Amino acid sequence: MRTGREARRRPHARLGCSRHGTLILGTLTLDTAPAMPRPLLPSVLRSGPLAAYGLYIAGSALLASNPVVGRAVAHVVPPIGLAFWRWLIAFLIVLPFALPGLLAHRHRLRAQWRRYLLLGVLGQGISGAIVYYGLERTSATNASLIYATSPAMILALAAVWLGDAIRPRQILGILLAMAGVVVILTRGDLEALRHLSFNAGDLLVLTGAVSWSVYTILLRQSGTPLPVVTAFAANAFAGVLVLAPFYLWETAAVRPVPFSVPTILSIVAVALFASVLALLAYQKTIAMMGAARASTALYVSPLWAALASWFLLAEPLQGFHLMGVLLVLPGVMLATLPARKPAVAPAAEAA
């Protein structure tokens, strides 16, 4: 018979994550331990396998919306302005739900303000604005495939930086994922390696993915996690503070954000769909399907991005994209999916 202590244990996905279950999610880092406040969840989304798989599909599609929208407005909305307004609007959307937690944890947040500003630089600055700079120069499909390697990067960084144990299967997965990145960076032409000739946009997106990986490692070292919505609001606000002076510079020296109806809708879309609703859908999917199964949404998201980019942006799907998919997605799955636990014999469990 299982003890009460065993019954209370929570499952968590091994996506280069801490024991609290930090999951890497495109532009989000979620902690699976604290529960999502129920008022955020419509009753229709609270039960049933159909709802679970619907949320799974919706969550992966919502994640894919960020590079697609970012690419669509790349030459209209300046990148720092897009990142700044995205995180400001996302912060304002969750603020009513996050405010009790922010007040309850205000002393901890105030004591760690330097840490949160650093997280804002890495998670919302470099991983946000720099990626939008990259999307001015590369396709949404390339960006989504490169960013999909983040969980494998986090696993490798955790092994080197924190001394985490790493299994041979995970090493193979990391190597496969990195090989997929090389295929994408070179457009399938290995001569580009010899001449060190790469697309600047791809390199900027890769910089954003590495920055996100470092950001996640720093989150792991922050001790007991805050509730999900509280942490999201704190990180979003830190990102707004970091981006604000650069946004003012961009507005004065480069070009301002053109506040037309299409651009406002685009900014609200990345704030609402790629940030807040992705958080909602993914968090509820974890509760309904378990963290390990829900985490596979990370591998489906680049496929949605590729299809949406082809249909909405007329981006061609080329052979090297298929080669990248065949290397990146299996590689990340090998590196991050948890090992299957051995079955416990009935007699042993009863004991």
Image (cartoon, rainbow, N blue to C red):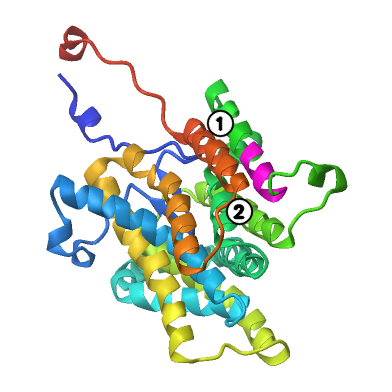
Instruction: Give me the C-alpha separation between circle 2 and circle 1.
Output: 17 Å
Please provide percent x and percent y for residue 94. 34, 72
Q: Secondary structure at mark 1?
A: helix
In the rendered structure, does residue 153 fall within the stretch colored magenta?
A: no
Residue at the spot 71% in from the left edge and 87% down from the top edge:
254
Structural crowding at the residue carrying mark 1, measured as other residues with C-alpha within 10 Å and reported as few (<14), some (14–19) or many (≥20): many
At label 1, which amino acid type do we have? Gly
Residue toward you, 300 or 111 = 300
Image quadrant in which the C terminus is located: top left
Q: Is residue 201 visible?
A: yes
Q: Secondary structure at mark 2?
A: helix
Residue 193, picture quadrant? top right
Residue 173's label in the rendered image is 1
Give left or right: position of 135 versus 3.
Answer: right
Sequence order check, earlier mark of 2 and 1: 1
Residue at the spot 53% in from the left edge and 73% down from the top edge:
72
